[in-house]
Every structure is written in structure tokens, then in C-alpha cells.
Image (spheres, rainbow, N blue to C red):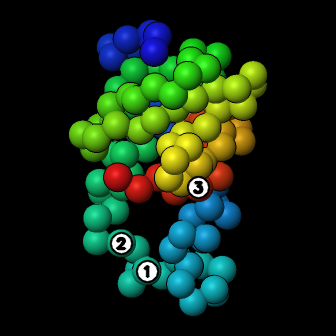
Amino acid sequence: MRGSGANDGRTIFAPTNEALLDAYDGDDSGEIESDEIPSDADEILQYHVLDSVFLAADVPESETDVPTLEGSDVTVVRSGDAVTINPNNEDASVTIPDVEVDNGVIHGIDAVLLP
């Protein structure tokens, strides 16, 4: 997978509010309480971050493993304009692609990725 390089910033796969509530709002209150936050939240957050900038168009059309800051890989694949993360597990779709920020790019996704 072609990226712009580790020194150029990072890529963040950011779950939508709805995805976070689906994953962690165990009592269906519409809020995530402190006791609903998983003990491995740091690892989960790092699993959503790549150490290079990848725009949606950079994602190949064949499944490709990419290392995360957490240490394990996510699998990414593109079909036309549709980008999917971990198609064999969470099957997260990029719903908001290519939000460029000073230190990289953010892609909104519709699921929480789990290492």
C-alpha cells in the first residue's frame, strides 16, 4: 500500500458516535458510562491509527494488511470508491473519507475495530 510516509503524519479510522454507542452502550442509555469503557481502551484506540497518511484512493483493490500503532495489522480493501477495514471481522466501512488535518488524515468508519 502506497502512503505518503511516516514522517508526514498519521491515518486515523474514527468510529462514528453511533458505532461507539453500538459497541459500548451496554445499558442502551444513549451514553457510554465510565464502567462501560473497556479496560484495553488504549490498545483499541491505537489499533485505529496508522503511522502514515493513506487517502481512500491509496487503498488497493485487493485485501492488504497494514500495521497499526497497537502493533497488529488491520486489513484494508477498496472496491471502486468504497473502502472496507477488516472485511473478515468488523467489516467496517469508511463512511466519511479523507478528512485532511494538519498531521494526517481521518476516515470516519461505521464500526469499532478490535485488535
Q: Nearer the viewer, residue 44 or 80?
A: 80
Give the SS element for disc 2: loop
Q: Left or right of 100: which side holds 8?
A: left
Q: Amino acid at mark 3?
A: Ala
- Residue 74: quadrant of the picture: top left
At horizontal 34% and vertical 62% (from top left) the residue drawn is 41
Q: Quick check: 98 above or below 72?
A: above
Q: Earlier in the sequence, mark 3 or mark 2?
A: 2
Q: Which amino acid lies under the numbered mark 1 shown in the image of this protein?
A: Glu
Q: Tell whether label 2 touches label 1 (CB within 8 Å).
A: no
Residue at screen point 35% across, 52% down? 115
Residue 107: in sight, yes or no? yes
Query: Residue 36, percent across and down?
Result: 43, 80
Which tag, 3 or 1, sits closer to the chain's start?
A: 1
- The residue wearing badge 2 is 38
User: Which residue corresponds to mark 3?
Assistant: 111
Q: Nearer the viewer, residue 23 or 78?
A: 78
Which of the two discs, 3 and 2, sits closer to the camera?
Answer: 3
* Image height of 111 relative to 72, above or below: below
Q: Amino acid at mark 2?
A: Pro
Residues at marks 3 and 2, CA–CA distance in whole angstroms: 15 Å
Q: Which residue is mark 1?
A: 36
